[in-house]
Image (cartoon, helix red, strand yellow):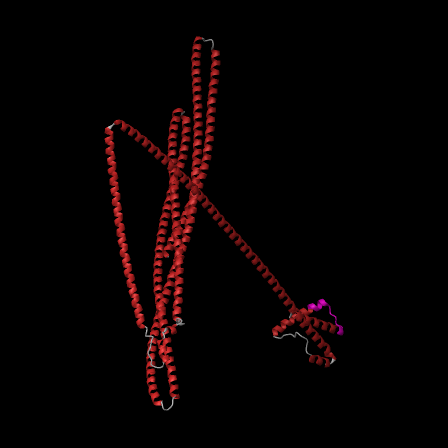
Amino acid sequence: MSGKENMLAGDLDDVLQQAEESLGITPPAAKFQTQTSLNLGRRRNAGRSKGHILFATAPPAKTRRSFADSPDSTENDLDQDEETSNRTALYEKNMEIIELREQHNLLLARSQDARVNWEAALASKDKAITQLEEALAAERKGSEQARLTAASALSQADARRSTANATDAALTEARREVDQLRQQVAAQEARIAEARQSAAAAASGLADQTARTEHHMAMMQAQVKELQASLAQRSADAQQHQARAEAAQAANSALQNEIMSLQARLSELNALQQRSIPQQSMVAPGPAEWAQHNEQPTENHITGVMPSAQTKVAVEADKELENRMTRLQQRLVSRDASARKYKEAVKVLKARILEALKVATMQQQECEQLRFQLAESHRARESLQRELDAQTGQGEKQAAHSDILVLQSRLQALENQLSDQSCQHKAMEDRLGSTMEQLASAESRAADAEKRHSLCHHERDEAQQRAEALKARAEKAESYGQKMHRLLQAMRAHLEAAQKQQEAAQQQAQSQQCQDEQQNSCRLKDELSEAKQAVAAASMQAQSIQERAAHAERQCERLQAALSDEQEKCTEAQKRASQLEISFKGMQEQADMLRDKLAHAVADHRRAQEEAAKELAAARVAWEIKRRDELQDLQAQVDRTRHAQEAAEVRLAQLERCECRAQQTSKSVDGGSDHTARAAACRMQRLKEVLDMRERCIAQLQDKLREQQAQHAQVEMGLRAQLEKRVKALEDADKRFGELEALMRRLSVRSGIL
C-alpha cells in the first residue's frame, strides 16, 4: 500500500505544479510548507471536532464543470479552494506516509532487536550446551580414569596375591621336604638304634631270644586281632551289600509288577476300544457284487483318511508346549549357572574379607609392638633422667628435666595417636563384621532364591507331566476320531452300494416282461424290504457313529480347554521365572556393585594401613635416631660440664694453696707486700677468666638447647602433618564405609520389598 500511495502523491504533485504554472502562482517552498502544515493541523483538528473528514482525493468532474460554467468572479475562488483542498489532501497523505514510514522503521528496529536477542539467546544456549558437553566429557574421563585405576589396583592386588600364593606354596613345599628329610633321618636313626639293639641282643643270649619271641608273639597276636577286625568289617560290608541286593531285587520285582499291571490295563483298554468299534462286516442279501463288497475288508476304505482339524490343532498346541518346556529348561539351566557364579563370587568375597581381617590383626600386633617399644623407651628415658639428675648440677638438672618433660609430652601424643589408630582399627573390624553379617544375609537370600528355583523346577516337572498326559489323551482322541471317520466312510460306501443295487433292481423290474412281473415283483419286494432294513440299520449305525463323533468332539474340546489352562499355567510359570530372573539379575548387579565397592574399600584400607605403617616405621626410625643424637649430645654436654667442673675445682684448689702459701709468705715476709698484691691481682684475673669461661659454656649450652628445641618443634610439625594426613585418610575410609553401609541397607530394604 505504501508504494501505491507514493505513486498517487507523485501524480498529485505533478498536477498541482502544472496548475500553478498555468495560473502563474509560484509561492515560496518554506512558506508554503509551513502554511500548509499549519492549515493541515487546524483543519484536521476542526474536522475531528466537528466529525467531518477531509477529501483525500480531487473533487469529481461535475464540480469542475460547474466551476467552469460559473462567472469569472467566482472562478478564481473556486480554483483556490480546489488547490487548497488538493494541497491539504496531498499533505495529509504525505503525513500518513511519514507516519507509516516511522512505524515501518520502528517495526524494523524491533525486529532487529528481537533478532539480536534471539541470536544472543542462541549463543548462550550453545555456550551452555558446550559447557555441558565439556562437563560430561570430563565426567566420562574421570569415570574412565577411576575405572582404569581400579582395574590396575585389582590387577596389582591379584598379582600380589598370586606372588604370595606362590611363595606360600614354595614355603609349604620346602616345609614338606624338610619334614620328609627329618622323617628319613629319624627312620635312619631308628634303624641304627634297632641294629645296635639287635647286636646287643645277639650278644646277650637266650634271655634276649625269649624276650624277642614273646614280643614276636605279641605282635602276631596284634596282627591276628587286626585281621579279625578287618574280617568283621568285610563281613559287615558283605551283609550290607546283600541287604542292598535284596532291596534292589524287591524294587525290581515291584517294578515288574507295575509293568505287568500297566500291560494288563493296556490290554483292557485295547479290548474296550475293540468292543466300542462296530462290526465292519455287514450281511445284505442281493446280487454277488453286494456279497463281494461286504466280504472286502474295511482297510481298503480306510486308506487315504486324514486326521480332523481339531486333532491337528491339538498336535500343534502340544508342539508349542514342548517348545515352551524346552525354553523353560534352558532358562532354568542358565539360572543354575548364574546361581553357581553368585555362590563362587560370595566365596571369593569371604576369602577377601578373611584376608582383610588377617591384615588388620597383623597391624594390631604391630601397634602393640610399637606400644611395647614406646614403653621401653620411656623406661630408658627415666633411667637417663635419673643419671642426669645424679651427675649434673641444679641448673642443668632443670634444663634436662624440661627437655625430658617435652619429650614425655611428645611421647604421650604419639601414644594417643596410636590409641586412636587402634580404636579406628577396631571400628574397621566391627564394620567388617557387619559386612560379613550382610554377606550372610545375602547368602540366605540366595538360598531362598535357590528354593524358589527348585519350586519352579518342581512346577515345571508337574507341567511336563500334565502336558505329557494331555498329549497322550490327544493322541488317543486323534486315533479314536480317525477310527470313527473310517467307520463313517465305510457306512457311506455301504449306503451308496445299496442305493446302486436298488436302482439296478428297479431298472430290471421295468425291463422285464409282463409275464415275469409277479415273480419279479415278489422278489423285488423282498429285496426292497431287505434293502430298507439294511438302510435302517445303516442309518442307526450312522446315528450312533455321529453320537460317538460328537462325544469325541466334546472330549477334544475339553482337552483343548485343559490345554489352554495348562498353557496359561505355563505362561504364569514363565512370568514367575522371568520375575525371578529379573530379581536374580538385580541381586547379581547389587552383588557386583558391593564386590567392587568392597574391593575399593579394601584397597583403600590396605593403602591407608600400608601408608600408616610406613609413616609409623619412618617416624619410629627418625625418632630413635633423633633420640640417640640427643642422648649423645646430652652425654657430650655432661662430659664437658664434668670436665669444666673438675678444672674449676682444680683451679680453686690451686688458688687455695696459693692463698695458703701467700699467707705463709706474708707471715714470714712482711716486707713483700707489693709482691703479694700483684699475685692477688693475678689470681683475681684468673678467677674472672674462669668465670667468663663458665658463662661462655653456659651460653653455648643454652644455644644448643634452643637449637634442639627448634628441631623438636620442626619434628612436631612434621608429625602433626602426618597425623593430619592419616586422620584425613581414616575419615575418607569412614565415609566410604558409611556409603557401603547405606548401600547395604538399601539392598536389604529392596530385598525385603522383593
Left or right: residue 611 versus residue 565 is right
Using the image as rendered, state which of residue 445 and residue 679 is in the foreground. Answer: 445
Residue 471 versus residue 162 in the image, above or below: below
Residue 699 versus residue 677 in the image, above or below: below
Magenta stretch contains residue 30: yes
Residue 262: percent from the left, percent from the top? 30, 63
Residue 622: percent from the left, percent from the top? 45, 33
Point out the residue furthest to the front here: 515
Locate the N terminus and report the quarter of the image it occupies.
bottom right
Using the image as rendered, state which of residue 275 and residue 468 is in the foreground. Answer: 275
Q: How many numbered discs? A: 0
Residue 309: percent from the left, percent from the top? 40, 71
Left or right: residue 561 versus residue 662 is left
Q: In which quarter of the image is residue 263?
A: bottom left
Point out the residue furthest to the bottom here: 514
Q: In which quarter of the image is residue 230?
A: top left
Locate the C terminus and report the quarter of the image it occupies.
bottom left
Using the image as rendered, state which of residue 412 and residue 259 is in the foreground. Answer: 259
Look at the magenta stretch and give its main secondary structure.
helix
Magenta stretch contains residue 676: no
Do we see residue 228 in this rendering?
yes
Residue 370 versus residue 144 in the image, above or below: above
Do we see residue 727 in this rendering?
no
Q: Which range of residues does the magenta coloring cover?
A: 21-34
Using the image as rendered, state which of residue 40 and residue 190 is in the foreground. Answer: 190
Residue 65: percent from the left, percent from the top? 71, 80
Name the residue located 69 percent from the left edge and 79 percent from the top edge: 63
